[in-house]
Amino acid sequence: MVINSFPFRSILVPLDGSALAEQATPLACHIAQRSGGKLRLALVHQPPTPPLDVAVAELFTSLELTTRKSERGYLRAMQGRLRESGTRLSSAVTLTGAAGPGPALAQYIREMGIDLVVMATHGRGGIRRAWLGSVADYLIRNLAVPVLLVRPEENGRASDRAARAGGILVPLDGSPLAEEALDPAGALARVFDAELTLVQMVRPVLLATSSAFPYPSSYDEELTELCRAQAQDYLDDVVEQMQSRGIRASGAARVAWTAADAILDLARPERVALVALATHGRGGVRRLVLGSVADKVVRGADVPVLVYHPTGRGKRSRTSRRIRSGRSRSTQESRR
């Protein structure tokens, strides 16, 4: 595992003209001010399909020009409000997204070398508790830069809550892919002077008590505790490495039947300020599908979630190899 400097020099906030999307700006401004980075605003204009009727073509052109003018005016107003807060702004642009906002934003992010995207999970489409907005969903699946998601609220309180101080919860599973989230999480910890709380969920080792039952009906407490202790040993090593780089950190391995539900229980607003996690862990990287645990946490957390799509190109850490190898040997010996 290598923890590099992850600078937030250029921070992008996608907007769509809605009050929901704007709720990501306080947190983005806070990061920009504390990191010395510059903020960019982007709004994607989606041109409607031109009419086939020549008689209404002139009206269509007039409406299109009026819409673009309104969007530019909206961005200028947002720039004015943010400058008054002391935020350094780099630019505010209107992009054309014939293929949709997601692809247009992704292309812009790659071309401009954006370091961090801060956005609301929902915008004009409104809030549905169980699902991400389509633009947020597209970006976290297709970007190689961290995306910090803020779940907006109809009453606007999410913006105030998101910018407050607090710890950063980082779920790990012992894999190098999951460890890649430590890089941007560590950078945010430095920005906020926050402590990283590392956690690994250990599923109980199930044992069948009777051949009459098709599924295991109990678990081996001794073997489960052994797995938990090994996971704790792994976390202690990661914590030590983070602390050696000047980042405050602590770690705890917990036994849980469902990792996602246990993480969501820890990721409550009264406990942490945000969660940072990789989209994939032991299950490996599949480009178009989120890891199951990450998917549930992103969709269900009540605090902002920093999501990072791991590259999978890094070398497996010696800590991960040792812990997983040791766990395998211990499990085999216990079953003999």
Image (cartoon, grey):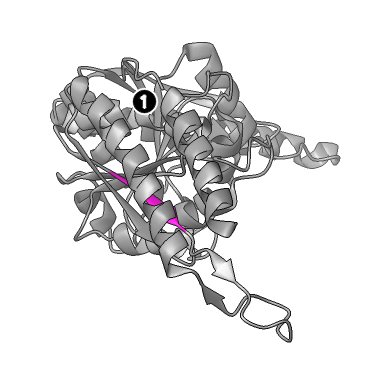
Q: Residue at x 83, y 36 (%)?
A: 54
Residue 165's spot in the image, x, y percent?
14, 44
Residue 329's spot in the image, x, y percent?
54, 43
Q: Determine the secondary structure under disc 1.
A: helix
How crowded is the residue under tag 1: few (<14 C-alpha within 10 Å), some, or many (20+)?
many
Q: Is residue 125 above or below residue 115?
A: below
Reading the image, the residue beneath label 1 is 183
Q: Residue at x 47, y 25 (%)?
A: 145
Q: Quadrant of the N terminus?
A: top left
Asked if one can make out residue 190 in the rendered structure from this viewpoint, the answer is yes
In this view, the residue farthest toward the bottom is: 212
- Front position in the image: 173 or 55: 173
- Front position in the image: 229 or 235: 229
Judge whether residue 206 is colored magenta.
no
- Front position in the image: 197 or 251: 251
Question: Magenta part mainly helix, strand or loop?
Answer: strand
Q: Give the left or right position of residue 242, taking residue 206 as reference.
A: left
Residue 335 sits in quarter: bottom right
The residue type indicated by label 1 comes to: Asp
Asked if one can make out residue 24 in the rendered structure from this viewpoint, the answer is no
Q: What's drawn in magenta, residue-wise?
A: 198-202
Q: Residue at x 31, y 15 (%)?
A: 5
Residue 178's spot in the image, x, y percent?
47, 36
Q: Give the left or right position of residue 245, taking residue 280 as reference.
A: left
Residue 198's spot in the image, x, y percent?
30, 43
